[in-house]
Amino acid sequence: MSASRADLADLLPEKIDIDPERVEQGLAQLVLTLVEFLRQLLERQAVRRMEGGSLSEDEVERMGIALMRLEEKVEELAKQFGLTKEDLNLDLKPLGKLL
Amino acid sequence: MSLLIHAISASPCDEPPRGLAGVPLVWVPAGELGLWASPSEGPLDRELVFDHHRIVEQLCARTACLPVRFGQRVEDEDVARERLAARAGELGATLRRIGGRQEIAITLLWQCSPVIEGRGHRVQASTPGRRFLETRGQAFADEDGRRAAAEALAERLVRELAVDQADVRHAICPAPDLALSSSLLAVPGAAEQAKEDAVRVTATLEGVRAVVSGPWPPYTFAETA
């Protein structure tokens, strides 16, 4: 447990950046990264269900449209905060990138 | 004065190489370990990367070291000593395992993208929602195909090079053009032979182009440093 805590401590910055100009962007980046992570999970699940034939035509269409719009919205919000798609990721060091 | 850390060792060596910009290296002892560093202020630019690597190579050639990747800078000697002492057990164990060894890097670039049989159908939908999901399904199938093929290549490398699993690290599909980025920890004194073996084995792999480089200080296996 202590080793895990030490590993985690290495991943975290020693000082929290409280620059008011950047704190909003940093928070947006963290939130949007998590949203993007969930969006990609949903997308995978939707494709799996479509390919497995467990969705009706109408459900496939509605789910596809919803996921398409969600992607557009994430991109739009990221752009507003000056973030690119590559910014919506977390480096989990020994585990690699989140996305 | 800040210090840029180059390597961790159990003892200082005679006639250490010159540090960054030709200044003497600093040896910071902490218990049974110590670290080599150069005084460093200002931006960490490209020239310093090469200079750091030169220092690490020369230190590793003189004594058993844990190479430290470029960019690890601490405020002063006290902070360096404190951080080293806090991880002495883990670093000492890694040093005993990889000290005096070198690594060979193998990079496999895709020449053609593999696909999984039975998946990856053509996108045929006429409605936007289904078309979106079918396009994604195609992309996922391509991605899964590349990943499965890269994992098979990694397994084949380990098998044909007869390396211990503990002495190999793989990054599977680390970038769109890359199938595999692997590092092999060579037995002491056998790095050149390991490189020759890697060149010979990778030349037989289909669908990829191989780049074999090294021997390098074992940066990949000293990641805990």
Image: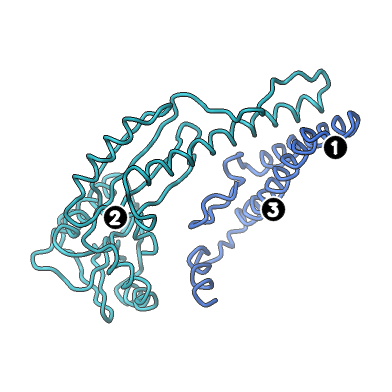
Chain colours: A blue, B cyan
Q: CA distance from mark 1 to mark 3?
A: 31 Å
Single out the mark in the foreground, 2 or 3: 2
Callout 2: SS: loop
- Residue at x-position 41% and y-position 29%: B208
- Residue at x-position 27% and y-position 69%: B96
- Residue at x-position 72% and y-position 37%: A76
Q: Quadrant of residue A58?
A: top right
Location of residue B27 with respect to A19 vertically, above or below: below
**Tag 3: amino acid:** Val
Single out the mark in the foreground, 1 or 2: 1
Binning the other alpha carbons within 10 Å of mark 3 as few (below 14), some (14 to 19) or many (20 upward) gives: few
Question: Looking at the image, do the residues carrying marks 2 and 3 touch, with CB atoms under 8 Å apart?
Answer: no
Disc 3 chain ID? A
Residue B5 has which mark? none
> Furthest residue to the bottom?
B31
Q: Quadrant of residue A27?
A: bottom right
Binning the other alpha carbons within 10 Å of mark 1 as few (below 14), some (14 to 19) or many (20 upward) gives: few
Q: Is residue B120 left or right of residue B78?
A: right
* Residue ID for mark 1: A54
* Residue ID for mark 2: B218
- Residue at x-position 39% and y-position 35%: B108
Callout 3: SS: helix
Location of residue A46 with respect to B90 vertically, above or below: above
Q: What is the quadrant of the C terminus of chain B in the image?
A: bottom left
Label 1 vs 3, first from the N-terminus: 3
Give coordinates of residue B210: x percent, y percent.
Answer: 34, 32
* Residue ID for mark 3: A31
Disc 2 chain ID? B
Q: Are marks 1 and 3 on the same chain?
A: yes
Callout 1: SS: loop
Front residue of this view, candidates B12 and A48 = A48
Give coordinates of residue B9: x percent, y percent.
Answer: 23, 69
